[in-house]
Amino acid sequence: MHLFAPDGFSKREPGARQILRVPKTPIGIHEPWAADGHDKLNKIGFPIWALVDDATGKWLGAWIVPNNRDPNIVSYCFLETVLKYKGYRLRVREVRERETTVDWERGRRAERQDIYTDGSMTDGGVASAAVWMKRGEEKMRRTLRIGETDEHTVYEAELMGITLAMEIAQEHRFKGKIHIGLDNQAVLTTIKTRSPKFAQKMWEDLGRLIKTYLKRDPTNEVEFRWTPGHEGFEGNERADGAARGAAEEERRMGGEEEEEEEGWEDGRMVPISRAATRQRLMKEIGEKRRDMWKNSTRYDRMQGFDDTMPSKIFGRLTKSLRRKQASVIFQLRTGHVQLAKHLYTMGKEESPMCKGCGRRPETVYHYIMECERYETARRRHFAYMGRNQRTMTRLLKEEKLLPKLFSYINDTKRLKRLFGTFDTG
Ligand SMILES: [Zn+2]
């Protein structure tokens, strides 16, 4: 084999890039079966297709076939096995190695509704992107910077990428099958098993978007494909670039030193990552302790740890308040907030238009900077600040401006039903 298929061997060489493998979780004998095409002997004319029992590793059947990707041939082999074992199991797992997937993707015909998604984490932040490719030409892209590196994980960014893809589909009235490509095995596995363990809120939102799409027409379908990154697929590369660009965006726009935003860290209601938060908190606690140790005499060192107590208690007292504020800020920043425009996109509202003035779609910008209905509140709280994008970005970013923002939100009563009144102290 070494002689005939050197590719496969070089990929498994120690030090070569890891071949991605999903951990197996069989629940018992014959549950599930794993189906796999083996390409190692293709070059000398022996494509193989096989079924293996995941739990025991027993080969249920293996065939040398003319083509191990032809659905007719694969079905035949599968049914043969079903006959042999007098039945088939609940689940059949399709095994696809990176190399196989790359081949499939390369040979795939470009469709009208291909959307490639990606999530990215750079020094500038965490962001998502979706790029719509129509028969190989870019039609449009959507990006979203979801937050700081210590607030979110790439997993969430990838998930948000799919949400953006569904939003493109919604807005452009897609019909029939949507093909969504992503390069994240964890997210794909969750799609297959339908049992999200992280970012539940985001999964719910996404689930709703997909359901709305499927309900709209019986021919509507959503297909998720693993599109391995860095293999030169154009849609992938574009989504990757778009997400990276978006991650850096705010930094370029602001031009100033990023301010530490305290109070956003707890995220039970918000899709802010617990894993990322924990990492950051542990790091901060570590640093704090080290500093205290350095700056104290031995006696003080004993006292030092007690000093952390008051702030801990304070933190607990204000936790619920901060959580609510963190939640609304995240929603306003990402646009995923209960305003008409977003609700319309999610299929929960008949029209995107603002009910306050009836003049424009109720976007976050319209609500905060523009709607005449709230002009009195705006004058009161944002008196000399400009009415522009930059002001809005500052309001959503700078901690010292938050009391103003929350006073404004309170005065407009627009989000009161959902959030109640915000503490502005
Ligand atoms: Zn309005």
Image (cartoon, rainbow, N blue to C red):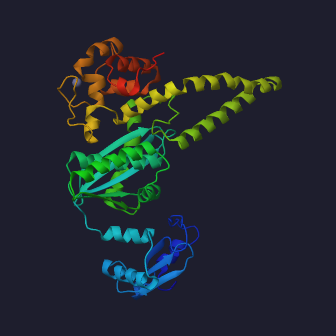
- Left or right: 174 in relation to 421: left
Closer to the camera in the image, 384 or 32? 32
Closer to the camera in the image, 106 or 86? 86
Closer to the camera in the image, 195 or 108? 195
Give the image quarter of residue 282: top right
Residue drawn at x 54%, y 80% as measured from the top left = 58
- Left or right: 326 in relation to 175: right
Residue 397, given in percent of the width and then of the height, sits at 42, 28
Residue 86, given in percent of the width and then of the height, sits at 44, 82
**How many numbered badges does the structure rendering display?**
0
Closer to the camera in the image, 134 or 278? 278
- On the question of residue 321 being in view, the answer is yes
- On the question of residue 262 being in view, the answer is no
Residue 138, given in percent of the width and then of the height, sits at 24, 54
**100 w.r.t. 304: above or below:** below
**167 w.r.t. 402: above or below:** below
Residue drawn at x 71%, y 23% as measured from the top left = 307
Residue drawn at x 77%, y 23% as measured from the top left = 303
Residue 38, given in percent of the width and then of the height, sits at 44, 79
